[in-house]
Amino acid sequence: MSQDTTRPLAVPDVAGTRVPPPHDPEHGLPATFGSGGKGRVLFWIAVAFSAFQVVTAFGIPLDFRIFGQFEWLTLIAVLRAGFALWFAWILLSALRGRMMGEAAIAFLALLGASELVTLYTGTLPNQVLRTVHVGFLCLTACGLLANADETSPLARVFWWAVGVVGFAAGLYHWWNYVELVNRAGDLTSGDMVVGLSALAVLFLLVWRAMGIALPLVSGAFLAYCFFGNYLPAPFNHRGYGFDQVIEQMAFGTEGLYATPTAVSATFIFLFILFGAFMERAGVIDFFNDISMAVFGGKQGGPGKVCVASSALMGTVSGSGVANVVASGQFTIPLMKRSGFNGAFAGGVEATSSMGGQIMPPVMGAVAFIMAETIDVPYSKIVEAAIIPAMLYFAACYWAVHLEAGKLGLTGLPKSELPSARAELRKRWYLIAPLLVLVYLLFAGFTPLFAGAIGLALTVALILALAISTGLGSTALRVAFWIGFALLSAASMAISVATVLGVVLLLVIWNTLRGRSGRDVLDACIEALADGARQALPVGLACALVGIVIGTMTLTGIGTIFGSWLIGIGKESMFLALVLTMVFSLILGMGIPTIPNYIITSSLAAPILLQLDVPLIVSHMFVFYFGIMADLTPPVALAAFAAAPMAKVSGMKIGVQAVKIALPGFVVPYMAVYDPTLMLQPVAGLSGAGYWLAVIYIVIKATLAMLLWGTAFVGQFMRPLSTWERILAAAGAGLLVAAVPLTDEIGFAIAAVMIGQHVWRLRASRTAA
């Protein structure tokens, strides 16, 4: 196995190899585990991290009796027996002179992860899960930093030591959980040392891995806890002792281990792992090929391929800046070769990739945090995002279409395009786990259950594909797939444990197949390690931003900000919304979307709710502008990530991205004034009347989006004159405004602009 490159799985029709960049595109963490022995140690730590998260996510009690009449025959007993056999095999192999170094590393790492779970009967306590999760984050991230430094042995030792301290803090909570619960509020000197160590490690690690902005914001809130009592009214508080603050931040569920960390340790990690396995199976390449087949031959085809593939990728990955780097290496050069300038090509890639965070069904990590924070089913968040996401990507598509028409660009030759029918016939099975995931989410199952089943089915599919290639005849393969389908369906109907049993059978089968089967298992293990690596920035941000939540609940500072914003909102709702947007955009210049959303939603969303903005809409409002911050100059992370590939400055790309993403700025305002745009209930509307209102707002928003695009690009069926562009922008603005008669005037202006434009086009053709 190679930990330095991403290897495609050894199954049929799986598309090519992706080589990750040397560092994460959005953060300062290396993208590889390092070379040599130290790299292998870290690799297996990451695998153990993922294994720990998978076992806890599935929620199967390990003390469960396999057969009721045998009290001793539990899953723990079977697991430990398996480790005993593994140890015996390693020992015998070593005595025969075989090199068993890596097997020993793997054994120790996975045995350690197993013992972390088996200490407690039943399932792991939630508080322990959160603390151990953060400990693993610290150990793995620090290991990446240590192994990446090839010049300074002292720096390597330092970062490994920091990681061990962070992991030890998690182990302290794990070992002393019952005692800590019993003496809550009465910290010992040992507790104080552990709490301070956890805070120091996270501040230092996030500073090194993600920049200074988030530690500064969290540090300011932490300082307010200590020194806020010295501020003048109304900004002061009653004052809190040192031990009170440490307990709030490093113990319990209000600081480092608050709701964001809980979501990171469950939903987010599982879905990141699901995306890692889907990518390893070739789903991203499959989506690119389908997009190329469907849109590549159309006007401005490469740009439309970029939009479509990013929308499809977003259904799996839910990431933003990382998508720019992953797909931009292919789409940006292709767009430039077809005739788009570098700034526009980079803007299209940045805008469409960031849309992955709002694209159902997976969306971004923020969606899971939102569902947990406001206590609504995840499916309701998905429902609210459907129409805005479609409008967002339609706006990107429309901008590409207009720009291509303005430049006179055509599509790619048919000879260069794959066949959509052939691709679907060849690799349709790759989307089966995604379809199951969507069904489970909308059938009312929890995201954790849906993600666990989706992940298990993805692994099962990969393993089954490998087995089917080794079957000699077509009849055997058909019989195998029928049996696999029936067994999978039956296992899903029984329990999660049964699904895992199917996966275990396939693992054993591949193990017995020889080298080819073990190659597939090795690639699955690499996917586990890669999923853990991808989860690091999200998890670290969730942990450190918990300090903001801890400060809010301890001091009540949110009420100060809320009173100020409510005072403004009572006079002008629009001004309150603008101030919230500006706050999100400014905050987003320095920190990623997740902490941006957590901070802004903690401060502003409750106030918007008091101003009669529906609950989900108020949180979606700050979520959207957290995303837009990554496109908005001067600090546009997505734009600057696209700059090296476009060979244009990030500022120029950011300007283009803002123009393309304008509906992303407008739709949240429209949803506040008309919640039907996010499929939210409205008093007095039900049945057919409600759905007519939904259809009306969709038509209005779509027309506004079309007018914005024509105004900014300066193109419709032909180039627009200056006064036509002004007319289009005015019509779009009036359609967005929620003031009496603005809709009617906006529709009239749109009709006049489009009508005269068509008339002038026909007149010019007649004259020619």
Image (cartoon, rainbow, N blue to C red):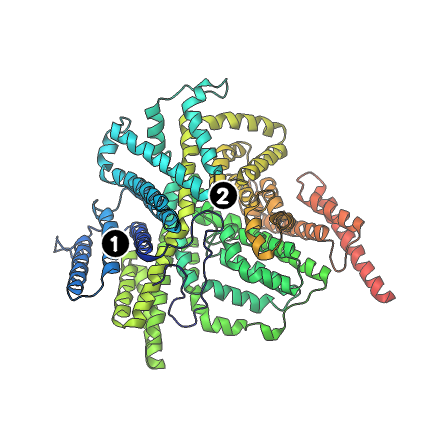
Q: Quadrant of the C terminus?
A: bottom right
Looking at the picture, tell me which residue is in the foreground, 192 or 186: 192
Where is mark 1, residue-wise? 110
Q: Residue 592 carries which label?
A: 2
- Label 2 residue SS: loop
Dividing the picture into quarters, in which one does residue 453 lie?
A: bottom left
Residue type at mark 2 is: Pro
Q: In this view, does 756 lie above or below 485?
A: above
Q: In which quarter of the image is the N terminus?
A: bottom left
Residue 17: x %, y % from top left: 44, 65
Residue 755: x %, y % from top left: 78, 56
Q: In this view, does 762 lie above or below 568?
A: below
Residue 589: x %, y % from top left: 55, 40
Per the model, the C-alpha gap separating discs 1 and 2 is 32 Å
The residue depicted at 35 percent of the width and 52 percent of the height is 449
Of all residues, the one furthest to the right in this rendering is: 767
Q: Is residue 484 above or below residue 340?
A: below
* Mark 2 Cα shell of 10 Å, populated few (<14), some (14-19), many (≥20): many
Residue 245: x %, y % from top left: 36, 27
- Horizontal side of 92 relative to 338 (left or right) equals left
Total number of numbered discs in the rendering = 2
